[in-house]
Image: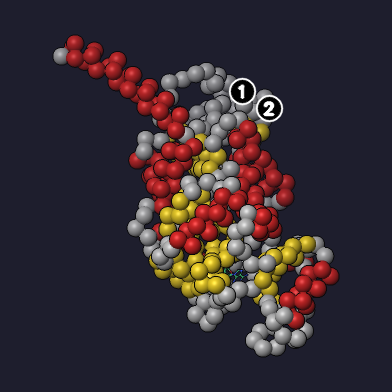
Amino acid sequence: MSLDLPGLSDLSDLSAPRAQTSLRIAIMTDETGWHTARLKRAFRARGAQARCVDLAQCRIDTTWTPHGLMLPGFGRTLPDAVFVRGIAGGTFEQVTLRLGILHALREAGVPVYNDARAIERSVDKSMTSFLLHRSGVPTPATWVGESAAFAQRVLMREAAAGRRVVLKPLFGSQGHGLRRLGPAGARPRALAPLPSLKPYRDVAYLQRYVDAGRAGFDWRVLVIGGRAVAAMRRTGGKGWIHNVAQGAKCEAAELDAALARTAIRATEALGLDYAGVDLIPDPDDAARPLVLEVNGVAAWRGLQSVTAIDIAAALVDDLLGRRLPAQREALARASDASTAAVVPLHERRG
Ligand SMILES: Nc1ncnc2c1ncn2[C@@H]1O[C@H](COP(=O)(O)OP(=O)(O)O)[C@@H](O)[C@H]1O
Ligand SMILES: [Mg+2]
C-alpha cells in the first residue's frame, strides 16, 4: 500500500476504513542515515512499512478530521506506531510543539516508542537524577538549582572534603559543555570558583565526580523491553569524558549481573521502553556500578560495532511484539482470511 497520500489540497476523505495490509510506522527524525536505514530494513523484514517523518513538519490542526493531527505521508490517518529516533533542537516553543505532537499521538492511541513523557524525563538530567535516586538506583550525589550561591556552597563543601563535581548542561548530550570543578589530587582546601552559569542557561546541575582512575572508562548498556541486551566499555575520548562523539573507543564488555540489573532499574525508573544507560564503576565498591545518565533517544552505532546482536532488529521486535501485539494479530488474521478466500478460488479454477 502506498503511503504517498494527498496533502492539504486534496479533500478526498481518507478517513474511511480501508483494508490495511501491513503495519505503518512513523520513524520520527530530522536526519536520515545509518540508524534510520537499519530501522527501516528491520521493519520491512517483519512486514511493516516504516517511513521517516520530521516532527518539525507535523501539525496540530483541529480541522484535520478525525484526529486533529497531520503527519506528512499519512494523510488523514495516523501511523500504527511511532519510533522516536530524533527530536531536533529549536526554540523552547518549537521543542514544546514537537514533544506535544508525540504527546498528542499517545492521546490518540498511537504507541510511541519511547513515550514523550519518558523522553522528557531522560532529556532533563535533573529529573533523571531525581527519579533514579527515588527508585534507589545507585547514582552519584547530585544538586540542581538556579542559585549560583547555592551551587558555590556545594562546590566549596565538596572541595573541602577533597571531592570534585561535574557541571553539566541540563539538556546536554555527547559530552558537550561538561566541566569538572574542584581541587585535583591532594589540595582539598584549594579555592574552587564556580564559573558563570550563563552558558548553562542559569541552571547549575552538579554531579559528584567519580574518579575511575588513570585508565578511566565508563559503560554504555543498552536496555530493550526490560532486558539488558548489550554493553560496551568506552575508553579514551576527551580526558575523563568518554563519549563516542568525543573520540572514545568502544570495546565489547561483559554484561555482568550487577551492570545489567542496574541498567534495567534505571530504564524502569524513567519509564522508558528502551534506553542507553551510562554507568561508571563505584571506586568504593567495584560490584556497584553508578548510573551517570540515561538516554531515551539513544544512538547505537558505536555499540553495534562491538556486538553481534542486530540492535535495530531487537528494537523493532520489542516495539512490534510488546507494544503492538493486538494489531499484529489482527493483521495476521486478516491476511489469513484473505488467503483462505483466495486459495479455494484458485483451486477451483485449476
Ligand atoms: N559524575 C561523573 N563522574 C565521572 N565521569 C563523568 C561524570 N559525569 C559524566 N562523566 C563522563 O562524561 C561523560 C558524559 O556525561 P553524561 O552525563 O553522560 O552526559 P552526556 O549527555 O553529554 O553524554 C560520561 O559518559 C562520563 O565519561
Ligand atoms: Mg552520556
Which residue, given by chain and number where applicable, does mark 1 sit on?
A: 66
Is residue 5 at least partly visible in the picture?
yes
Which quarter shows the N terminus? top left
Please report the residue visible at 65 percent of the width from the left and 49 percent of the height from the top.
120
**Callout 1 crowding tier (Cα within 10 Å): few <14, some 14–19, many ≥20:** few
The secondary element bearing badge 2 is classed as loop
Q: Is residue 287 left or right of residue 141?
A: left
State the image coordinates of residue 193 (x, y, percent, origin top left): 78, 79
For the residue marked with disc 1, what is the amino acid? Answer: Pro
Q: Quadrant of residue 55?
A: top right
State the image coordinates of residue 65 (x, y, percent, origin top left): 62, 23
State the image coordinates of residue 63 (x, y, percent, origin top left): 67, 24
For the residue marked with disc 2, what is the amino acid? Answer: Thr
Please report the residue visible at 36 percent of the width from the left and 38 percent of the height from the top.
46
Establish if 36 lies above or below 343: below
Q: Nearer the viewer, residue 258 or 268?
A: 258
Establish if 235 lies above or below 36: below
Which quarter shows the C terminus? top left
The secondary element bearing badge 1 is classed as loop
Farthest bottom residue?
186
**Callout 2 crowding tier (Cα within 10 Å): few <14, some 14–19, many ≥20:** few
Please report the residue visible at 67 percent of the width from the left and 55 percent of the height from the top.
134
Quarter of the displayed picture in which ligand 1 can be seen: bottom right
Q: Nearer the viewer, residue 127 or 107?
A: 127
Which residue, given by chain and number where applicable, does mark 2 sit on?
A: 62
Establish if 169 lies above or below 20: below
Is residue 125 at least partly visible in the picture?
no
Q: Nearer the viewer, residue 120 or 32?
A: 120
State the image coordinates of residue 19 (x, y, percent, origin top left): 43, 21
